[in-house]
Amino acid sequence: MTPDIAIILGLLALGFILFVAETFSLDVTALILLSILFLLGYLSPLEAVSGFSNPAVITIAFLFVLSHSLQKTGVLEYLVVRINRLASKSRTLGTAVYLMAIGFASALVNNTAVVAIFMPVTIRLAHTYQVSPSKMLIPLSYAAILGGTLTLVGTSTNLLVNSIYSGSGSVEPLGMFEFTRYGVILMSLGLIYILFIAPKLLPSRTVTSSLTKSYHLGGYLTEMKIIAGSPLIGKTCLDRGINYNYDVMVLDILREKQLITRNIRRTPLQVGDTLFVRGTLENFLRMKEVEKITLLTDEKLTQSELEQEDNVLVECLLTDQSDLVGKSLMASNFRQRFGAFILAIRREGDIFRKKIAHVILQAYDTLLVYGPAKNIESLSNKGDFIVLGEVKAELRKQRFWWVSIIIILGAVILAALGIMPIMKGTLIGVALLLALKVLTPQESYQSIHWQVIVLIAALIPVGIVIQTTGTAEWIGKIISKIARMSSPEWHAHFLLALIYLITMILTEISSNAATAIIMTPVALAVSVQMGFDSRPFIFAVAFAASASFITPVGYQTNLMVYGPGGYKFSDFIRVGFPLAILFWVSAIIFLPMIWPV
């Protein structure tokens, strides 16, 4: 081992630790690694920024835009809901058709976009089948992951692996539908597992009939009545500092059978007013003593009681594109900005109910939102939220709505036929959408997941360093030695098993993009050392990096369903581990058959 290899291995170890510990966001961690390598002289200025001009990165950015344009049309929800109605007589058949439709959509459209579109549809379907959403949301994520393995553009991982592989020498780039040859096998095995085995392992945890019960809010929502002599009379909630002094949130005011829902904090209070409040019993008692009001302790509010007049109670998923990420509700001025309240926050199995105004929001937090129906409905039109409620499965026929469908299909077909590179096709497609005003420039910029783009662009030069310093070759020699411990006739299968297993483990604890960028050069090096064709090993990396089922942090779609499904970390291990092992075994069997070593 040379000093350079030791330094690179140390930095890679540091990177994985930061990825797992989530000390910084993934893109910031990638930029830190890139900066260190640049400062140490392992990268030239051009190499350091080469990721931002990489065709794979540019293609991924354009695919985000194309996916958003398709999402605007509503065509995916429309088709799936219509197809599912045909199979509504059988839950198993209906679920199978539904998951297949999601999988095929993910083959062409960004996985996160597909999950964002179908999460409300899935929750509604759970109500139809009278099952908990937790029985259907992990299958939604898994189906999207499986669909992404069907084509070159199905996931950013495939594009990255192809970019590194095609740049390694005189080899043919991976074809648009070359992934399909094994992807179909994975899709079939995965659907059989999801339909017949996963239901026995999936929890039935979330209470679908009452969000107040789901968030354990029964003891935190109640009524308080203003009586004669209260210092609140003639004052506003803002004047008396109700929220600041007692950490009690006034949701509505009932005055002589009239419900006041607007400008609550600035409405002068009167004798006999009933305040619908959120807080803790301790704070209620403290407020009662100081403000001389009556606590109606026997009137705990339920979801149906909260949904009075035009008010509704719904769950919203905070997207990674929201500018609320990294801010507290107080700092973001949520109530004034969106005209609604946040009653509770669910994050990775934990529920925050106290002092939520000061909780720093994270991507994919699930928010329990209360407010006027029209304000809640407007949230779904913003890129900040996915409203997990009822959805309308209808075509939204805005200007040239059909162009989005034709452009995506056209770009894929032209790339598959070798007429036009996928980057060129997506570039022309985005230009057409902007020229025809199907999308505005602002919508296009907002639709791109910049954190993903920066993450990948910053990691690509790291992959270059792994190759140029001989680190990939050094790791490859170790793997080769282990593989040679088996019988000669099993060297290829044993090596394939090792490559897939290492990739699978790394992708579960870090970013799938980071894993692909690190493991692709290693797979190339080890295949050359062993004298094998590199193609099956490259596909092993691509499929293993994408097929993340064991942890919620391994893949973005798993993280998206984590909160809304009310899952625990252990749920993903219990359901995902057998599936991951099944795919590992199938890769050892089928990859050498499809791409001989």
Image (tube, rainbow, N blue to C red):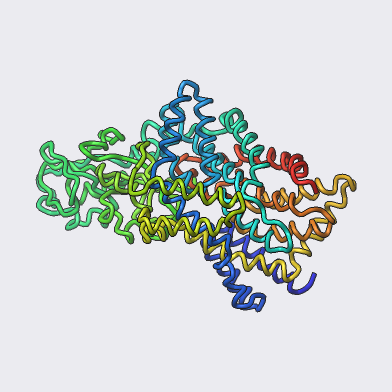
> Could one spot residue 367 in this view of the protein?
yes
Q: In the displayed structure, would residue 203 be above or below residue 359?
A: above
> Which residue is located at x 84 percent, y 56 percent?
530
Q: Is residue 352 left or right of residue 536?
A: left
Viewer-closest of 431 and 487: 431
Q: Please identify the residue farthest to the top as the structure is shown.
A: 89
Q: In the displayed structure, would residue 352 be above or below residue 100?
A: below
Viewer-closest of 580 and 263: 580
Quadrant of res 462: bottom right
Q: In the displayed structure, would residue 406 be above or below residue 527?
A: above
Viewer-closest of 466 and 575: 466
Q: Quadrant of the N terminus?
A: bottom right
> Which residue is located at x 48 percent, y 47 percent?
560
> Which residue is located at x 58 percent, y 52 percent?
415
Q: Is residue 336 left or right of residue 133?
A: left
> Could one spot residue 360 in this view of the protein?
no
Q: Is residue 120 left or right of residue 163?
A: left
Q: Position of residue 76 (x, y in %)?
A: 44, 40
> Which residue is located at x 54 percent, y 40 percent?
104
Q: In the displayed structure, would residue 432 be above or below residue 390?
A: below
Q: Please identify the residue farthest to the right as the structure is shown.
A: 488
Please tell me how many numbered marks the rendered image carries.
Answer: 0
Quadrant of res 476: bottom right
Q: Position of residue 422 (x, y in %)?
A: 56, 55
Q: Position of residue 187 (x, y in %)?
A: 62, 37
Q: Position of residue 432 (x, y in %)?
A: 42, 56
